[in-house]
Image (cartoon, grey):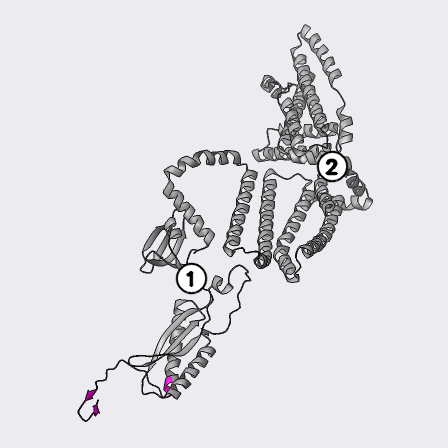
Amino acid sequence: MKKLLILLLMLSASTLLLAKAPLTLKTYYVQQYQVTEEMQDDKLTHEELKSLVQNQQKEIDTYIIELISNKEHTIKELTYNFTPEILQLNRKIHTNNALNNIEAVDRDTIAITTYHIKQNINDLLADVLSISDSLTTIEFNKQLNNILKKFQDAPGFMDESRYDEYYYSKSNDPITISIKHNLLDYKTAHTIFTNILTFFSKNQMKVHQAILLSKYQITTFNTYVNEFSSAQQINPTLAYIGLDSAKVVMILFILVSFLIFKYFLLFVTQFVLGIILKDKSDIEYVILKTKRIFTMFTLFLMFHILLLIYSGFILSERADHFISIIYVLIIAIMIYRLINTSIHVMSKHMQNRLRVRNEVINLSLKVANIFILSVAIMFILSIMGVNMTAILSGLGIGGVAVAFAAKDTIANFFGSISILLSDLFEQGDWIEVDGFEGTVVELGLRATTIRTFDNALIAIPNFKLADNGIKNWSRRSVGRRIRMHIGVTYGSDFEDIKKAIEDIRQMIKENPLIISDTVQSRYSHYLVKNEDLEGIKNTSLIYLDEFGASSINILIYCFSKSVVWNEWLEAKEDVMYKIADILKANNLEFAFPTMSIHLENKDREIID
């Protein structure tokens, strides 16, 4: 497994080398000189000039990677030294100074400066390529930064404004033409040198990967594939979409590799879970809960590598940041799923062996989830360039002062955290607390706002909510209680009463608006009772309850399927109508409060 992951990592990094055939420094100078000459055209619009600059930047980025990837070939070319040309020009300058040939001196001075810049480019590239490919990323970055610091202040630049007169001169004098040519040559060398420094400074990881993989000579594969006659025939067509034959072969190879990797990863996961978990249902549950996020990670990794192949491993800084953030999110979700799923599966076994309270497990899970979220946020902020050291230092230093100055605010803040962790209520819930009753509008950091049923808005500090008992009427998914007593007259026949009770029970059982059967929970949870967690009630009680003062009372106790108020009223109304029909069918009458007066005479006759 480890070797396979290393192979995939190397493969993604090796896409640095899938570019065009390597250029020589001399050829590249000629190309960039032509671009610089084109940029001097006064007829260029601002947009055209901007486009030329952007293309020039892209070309230098691609070319540097090519140079690094072809390390051995590049080092040989960098051994050339411009000292002979510089010495010869210095002698000419000395002679022309004596003859007072100012224009000739300017011409040769510009040329010498250009040679110094070219020498700096050679030395810079040679120093970077000389860094060992066995260094860690931190050590490599440290050495690279030292090299860049040395060349950032390197001599060899000049004040171009001194030679403005030559730019605008219309003279066809050979010396003037030579000066213009040398100025363009200087500008080209200066631009290339500046862009190289910028690239090394902003793309240290890419440079490190290119140097690490340069010894594998993967460009040989690229050249080999593109040299086929069939490849040369289709490459012009593929060029329209930024591809060539070598890239297509690599893309197909990646697709097949990831297809194999996916099934291999599934096989290894099942094997490892088979060792840890003995219950087959637990293994299937873990795979079911984690398979999707692992698939997402694999697909995104494949997409990332394919994107690198397509772009030649030259992605913009924003794209790199975006991809890094996506990786952080996917890995955070993956860890979240693994931890929660593992605890979920293992908790039922832990409770059989250890006396662990469910509340402790639940709290531990929430703390772990908050920690995962916090770490993910810190990584994302760090990727976005936020100085986390300064933020954490500021929180530590100012924490004490803030705690004394805003203790009520802090109490409310931690009260809101307590409410969120406890999951007491959410927006839209109907709650009752501290004598107030209404719908939750918003849970803020300081207070929770409630809209009462008489349409008033009340703000209750969060620490009071956390300290007081909260009655949440919305946390019920099935079952809203219907409770009533039906009184029948004392003159009723008990056989009729018994028959009516049986009929009412049957009516309640068959009523589509009343819940009487066992309700299947939507979730499987080992830590708390599902019915209590989701708010499911299906109790149905119909019994002869008591002999009242003026009636024989029958208890009706059941729950409507819907918890919505108007639907509950409809169910209750339906039950009442049907009860009335049942009593009528069984020769029973509703009792109403009555008073009987008994008079006793001497003959002990009772007169009503």
The label shown at residue 213 is: 2
Q: Looking at the picture, does residue 590 appear above or below residue 363?
A: below
Is residue 585 among the parts visible in the rendering? no
The residue carrying mark 1 is 474
Left or right relative to 447: residue 273: right
The label shown at residue 308 is: none
Left or right relative to 552: residue 165: right
Q: Looking at the picture, does residue 157 appear above or below residue 362?
A: above
Is residue 196 among the parts visible in the rendering? yes
Which quarter of the picture shows residue 307?
Answer: top right
Type of the residue with mark 1: Ser
Q: Position of residue 400 (x, y in %)?
A: 42, 36
Could you tell which of marks 1 and 2 lies nearer the N-terminus?
2
Q: Looking at the picture, does residue 281 appear above or below residue 588?
A: above
Q: How many numbered circles are shown?
A: 2
Q: Looking at the image, which is closer to me, 602 or 239?
A: 602
Q: Secondary structure at mark 1?
A: loop
Q: Looking at the image, which is closer to me, 131 or 268?
A: 268
C-alpha separation, residue under disc 1 versus residue under disc 2: 61 Å
Q: Position of residue 558 (x, y in %)?
A: 42, 73
**The residue positioned farthest toward the front in the image shown:** 602
Which quarter of the picture shows residue 545?
Answer: bottom left
